[in-house]
Amino acid sequence: MRYYVKKIVSLIMVLFLIMLLTFIAFQVIPGDGAISRLGVDATDEEVEALREALGLNRSLPERFFSFLGGAVHGDFGKSYQYSKPVSELLTARLPATVGLAAISIILILVISVPLGLLCSRKEGGAADRAVTILTQTLMAVPAFFLGIIITLVFGLILKWFQIGGYIDPKVNFTGFLQYMIFPAAAVAVPKIAMTVKFLKTSVLRELKLDYVRTARSKGNTERVVLWRHVLKNALIPVITFMGMVIADVLAGSIVIEQVFNLPGVGRLLVVAIGNRDYPVVEAVVVYIAAVVLIVNFIVDLLYQKVDPRVRMR
Amino acid sequence: MDKKNSGNHRLLLELDHVSVGFPIGKREISVVTREVSFQVCEGEALGIVGESGSGKSVSMLAALGLLGNGGHVVSGNIRFYPEKEQCLVLNQFTEKQLCEIRGDDISMIFQEPMTSLNPVMTIGQQVEEMLVLHGNCPKEERRSKVLSMLSEAGLPDTEAMYGKYPHELSGGMRQRVMIAMAMICRPKLLIADEPTTALDVTIQAKILKLLKKFQKQYGTTIILISHDLGVIRNVCSRAVVMCAGEVVEQGNVETLFENPEKEYTKRLLAAALGKGGILRRENAPQENIIVKARDYSVYYEEREEQLFRQDETVKQEEEAEKVENQKSELEQTIEPKEIQNNLSKKAEIQKENRQESESELEQPIEPKEIQNNLSKKAESQKENRQESESELKQPTAQRKNQRYKIEMLKRRFRQFLSGKTKRRIVNKVSFDVYAGEIVGIVGESGCGKSTLAKAVAGLNPLTEGELYLDCKQPQMVFQDPYGSLNPSKTIGWLLTEPLRLKHCGTKEEQRKAVEQMLEKVGLGKEYYHRYPNTLSGGQRQRVAIAMAIMLKQKLIVLDEPVSALDVTVQEQILILLVELQKEFGLSYLFISHDMNVIHRICDRVFVMYQGEIVEKGNTDAVFENPQHEYTKKLLSARL
Amino acid sequence: MKKQNQKNWSLIFGIVLVSIVCVFAFVGLFWTPYEPTAMSILKNKPPSFAHPFGTDNLGRDILSRVMDGASTTFLISVITVTIGLVAGTVVGAFTGYYGGIIDELLMRLNDTLTSFPSILLALVFVSVIGTGKYNIILALGVIFIPSFARVVRSEYIVQKELDYVRNAKLLGAGDLRIMFVHILPNTKPILLSSLTIGFNNAILAEAGMSYLSLGVQPPDASLGEMLSNAQTYLLNAPWFALAPGLMIVFTVLGFSLISENLK
């Protein structure tokens, strides 16, 4: 119980810290939102009026707490560019990003775990060597380049999907999935390669430990040793690794949304940075940070479930 | 040679000119044991003894196909006779056939109880797995069978034990679990590979007793692999001595140990049984005090998560002892009950003492001659100390309680911030060390001897009480010769470092001094440019010693300096240490868990138990006439 | 033996890849076959003798641009990794060696920062300080400090408990000497491998940023910026995308093969 309380308290503290850092970061920008919105030609009176309207002339702590209070309620103010509430923009963009991340993560889990085990069971075999070379190469391919190649091969040459033809999941869910599988593959493939390699290293490391010899000396067959004794131990570090992979998938989707022209949160962020639309940038950063932290939190809980040695603490 | 045994008993396992090798590359095979032959008869206990790298466990692992890295029997046969008229040639078995033998007919126990159990499975699951794999025990009966096996192996509170994970148990308890697991299918042959090496002597004795009990009770044949001749002698009736992959000598334990034929066996025996002669001088000088400690306590800061603590080990052992005592009452076996009960009571009392910080100080037993030698200054300080102590005793129970609460709150807060707690490891010890003598501190792991040693050398700032040193910064030699030398520097650089730091002489002079020192510790100039990882354990320890005496400081603290070394190397290092001590007039504070080593080299000895010095005196006096129960226990566990 | 051979083989392959890429980048610093920004009427032409990698949408020689882009990308990566390495080592050494409350606080912050993907942090940075070559260097450099500091710190925590450090203390070596003369050389293996990983991350991050047009700004060439342009002409001029893309793949693959074999 104390463990959970400690974890939750530290989660909230870190979230608060991130909001504070984000807020401060956007305060040190030379020239404030009002000027960037109106342009340098604006008169002082115009700027002052806008500052008043946007609440920019209040004191720093005051502004931070109103930002914080808003954020807790999901209110990040209005976008400079679209003149719409940021939260509205964000919710509109969520389906594409969440869908992309979810499909990628499912792909990663479904493909890499069996593949990793296959490789470590027959270490040095033909399948293992082929997979090793493949993973080594695929790990080196940046997701956006892979995305471009997928566009070229499957979109332009084979014409399996319409480039830029994003379909809203509310309109046609299967169509959405059919389209999303391609960007998801671009995000997932390098991560699959990494996970396979990590899992294999983890299993091979476990196989060298004393308890494996004990398990063998009990009369377990090699297969049972692997599945019953080694797998659970080997998966413990993989859980932490998956936490990192999920954070990476989120980041990867920022770029991939650009490649496949998906109306997701990542594109919103990139466009907002280009336009100096700070409320939007702030909101997206806080949103992604929250997701990453919550994923890490869940990873910690899972870890604690699987490893009895952590449970004691 | 074994006519007597094979005449009375049936042959069970036979190694017939067995060579074991590991493949290197596609065609080459490196042979690690050559033409090993011996036999084991049903019901007997055979010991295989040898130093590390002698290949003593390789043939046994090969017999069960557990070698890994492609190791296998290159030539010869391993024959196993489970029943009359049935002969199984194990080295020709397939993996599947071996799986049926393993655990059922032949089971194994390994050296490292800390890592030999699966960390994510409960004790119960792991023992029960044996029943699932072998034997047609119906599902409902398994649990009760496991529980009764656990209790047979001397584990307390078996119901709770069933659901525990390995990390919740001490080393001794885990080894009991391993034994329970190995014995639950009633194997014909139990192979124990260094089963007690990682354990403290008193726990060692208990584990060996357990093995002997099973051997007697179920007629299990035991092959005990160990580097420790004492362990072999304790358990086995016959022994095989191995060296460099070959059998040197074999025969009856009594005759083998009384009248060894081969030179190697003689050397091994001499080194191991402390028969290498006393190395210390007759009369050590006791004139000038070089270290004086009074009510000296040492604390240690540790992370909360470092869960496994020594006091827990003690607690578990005590519980097991209680269970065992109850049983032995029933079984009427010979057991010095009184001693053990006394000891556990004493331990409890000590624990209470430690919790109350202002408890009365136990007056240490100190030989009169030493006390007479105490300087006046020390005596006056002693008076002061007693006064201040009586002042400390003043606070009423209530105030004490409040203070305790505040202390706890503070501690909680500190823990929350840093996740660290402060624990008292060494509890108010008082002792003197005289210039030019070798003082031994002996005790089991976790008794605080190493912590005390480091504190004396000034490596632990969290201390309380008084410590006077009448010398320059003491130097230390550590147990692990692999960790005490910086791997990225050459031997020459390492030995020059003390001179460099103290700006002694020119570069030429420094180099000369280093080369001289290398000669002195028996290494030679040519080691100047070598890196530590190209040296053997013994050679590294020589370098470490050279480093410690480089600045000619008078006090050297040696923390288990020979424990990580093979017995024959131990011998050389001990001789070197004594030589150097005489030549430079050094004083040693010699920490060890090994009573034999202490006996040979120390002028006086302090016995530590749970953070306190429970006995001190001249080595001969302590060894011949131990006063404290714990010392008696340590001495009886020897051999 | 088989395994050893395989290892050697992959190490050689890694070295070959890295040297090819390095030659490209290094030569690209001083000389390119054509002026990288020189346009011509030969637009989107496939590879030929005159233009081994073809030409782009503005008729610029892709080989020259790849060489120029590679050298920019490399330069940025080298500088950022150096910033991260030096600052990270110092921070990690001090926090790891001394421990204490400051260490705890810094590491909490550090753990949080390193759990975020570097490209996201870089985006935040860029949105604050603006785009361009130097801002990217600053942003990535600062972002790499925590990960190096973390690695170095954990190594120092392990090393400072080793007996050789105790020995050095007993001999009277000062803290700074212990930290940087005694311990630092022993962190070399781990530093080398995190150096290669860091370098790869820097290349990927820079390419990603430039691809999003938030990194190196035209007319400066960079591999990511070329890819972003090439995407529009994917069907007509696939070589336009392949050249810079493969360049990145070769670099990252080469370095990861080498770091793999260093272990």
Image: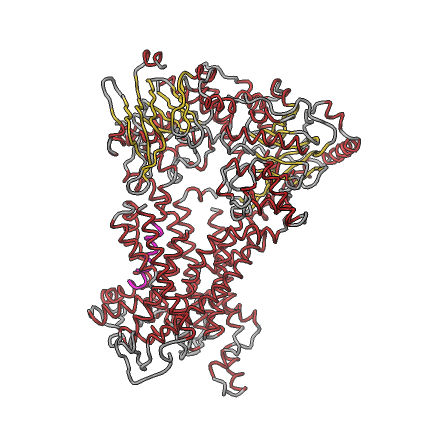
When the figure is inspected, residue B121 is found, relative to residue A266, above or below; the finding is above
Residue B470, image x and y in percent?
Answer: 72, 37
Task: Kindly tell me whether residue B39 is visible in this rendering.
Answer: yes
The one of C100 and B598 positioned closer to us in this rendering: B598
Q: Which residues are magenta?
A: A184-199
B86 horizontally vs C215: left or right: left
**Residue in the foreground of this view, choosing between B550 and B587:** B550
Was residue A190 drawn as part of the magenta stretch in this picture? yes
Quarter of the view holding residue A269: bottom left
Q: Position of residue A299 (x, y in %)?
A: 40, 52
Residue at image point 64% right, 41% down: B550
Q: Nearer the viewer, residue B345 or A63?
A: B345
Closest to the observer, A83 or C241: C241
Q: How many marks?
A: 0
Q: Main secondary structure of the magenta part?
A: helix
| Any part of residue C99 in sight | no
Residue at the image point whose x is 52% and y is 24% from the top: B271
Is residue B406 left or right of A14 when viewed as pictured? right
Residue C263 x/y as whole percent: 41, 51
Q: Quadrant of residue B151?
A: top left
In the figure, is residue B203 to the left or right of B583? Answer: left
Q: How is the image coloured?
A: secondary structure
Give yes or no for residue A212 being in the magenta stretch.
Answer: no
The percent coordinates of residue B181 (x first, y second) are 36, 29
Kindly identify the residue that appears in the image at 37 percent across and 54 percent down. A242
